Image (spheres, helix red, strand yellow):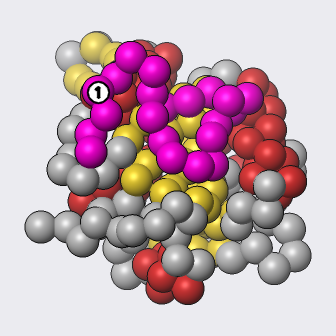
Amino acid sequence: MATIRPGHHSVLLVVDLQVGVLRDAWERTRILRNVARVVERARAAHVPVLWVQHADAEMPAGSIAWQWVPELAPWGEEHVVAKQFNSAFEQTSLEGELARLQATHIVLAGAASNWCVRATAHAALERGYDLTLVKDAHTTTTMAIGDGRRVEAADIVAELNVAMTWMSFPGRRNAVAPAAEVDFGTPHTPGAPDQR
């Protein structure tokens, strides 16, 4: 059973805004603009911004694909979490940094929706954090699933937004919100059941 985290300390977690991850991403320009908007809002509200940077055999550390996209990158002392698995929690510095910040609420944006964003969202809720997914600030690419069939990127993004609206965890709150309306306080989606 997860430890429910008391308090109301938010962080913004930005996942894998890297050249290789966003190369062919759906609505890349619009999504990056929305991520930038929520980053600016977090900084203005003095909410810590944490950045996740993935490396693996296909995107080795130091490669061009591994670099931050030119449009958006960490500032100064903002913490960078290096990861090698889909979830930003697996064998990384993230939990230690969240504990240091006394974080209880994670606002989540980035890429790719069906891999690292989804895995990180589930891991956060399973570890007792409240979660808000920024519904217009995450993206992915269209996925081939065999036999000539494809799952369109827009559908992957939409499905995750719906799932994170209605998913239920005891003692935690999860929500989705557009970048312009993210509340760095307590998450709640209008019309969705309050999970507490």
- Inspect this view and state whether residue 174 appears: yes
106 lies left or right of 66: left
Looking at the rendered image, the quarter that the N terminus falls into is bottom left
132 lies left or right of 66: left
Q: Which residue lies furthest to the left in this view?
A: 1
**Helix, strand or loop at disc 1?**
loop
Compared to residue 2, the image places residue 98 above or below, namely below
Q: Give the range drawn in magenta.
A: 176-196
- Inspect this view and state whether residue 28 appears: no
In the image, residue 187 lies at what x, y percent?
A: 48, 42
Looking at the rendered image, the quarter that the C terminus falls into is top left
* Identity, as a three-letter code, of the amino acid under mark 1: Pro
122 lies left or right of 114: left
Which residue is depicted at the point 45% across and 27% down? 189
Q: In which quarter of the image is residue 23?
A: top right
Towards the viewer: 117 or 142:
117
In the image, residue 35 lies at what x, y percent?
A: 72, 40
Q: Name the residue under label 1.
A: 193
In the image, residue 163 lies at what x, y percent?
A: 30, 29
Which residue is depicted at the point 21% across and 39% down? 168
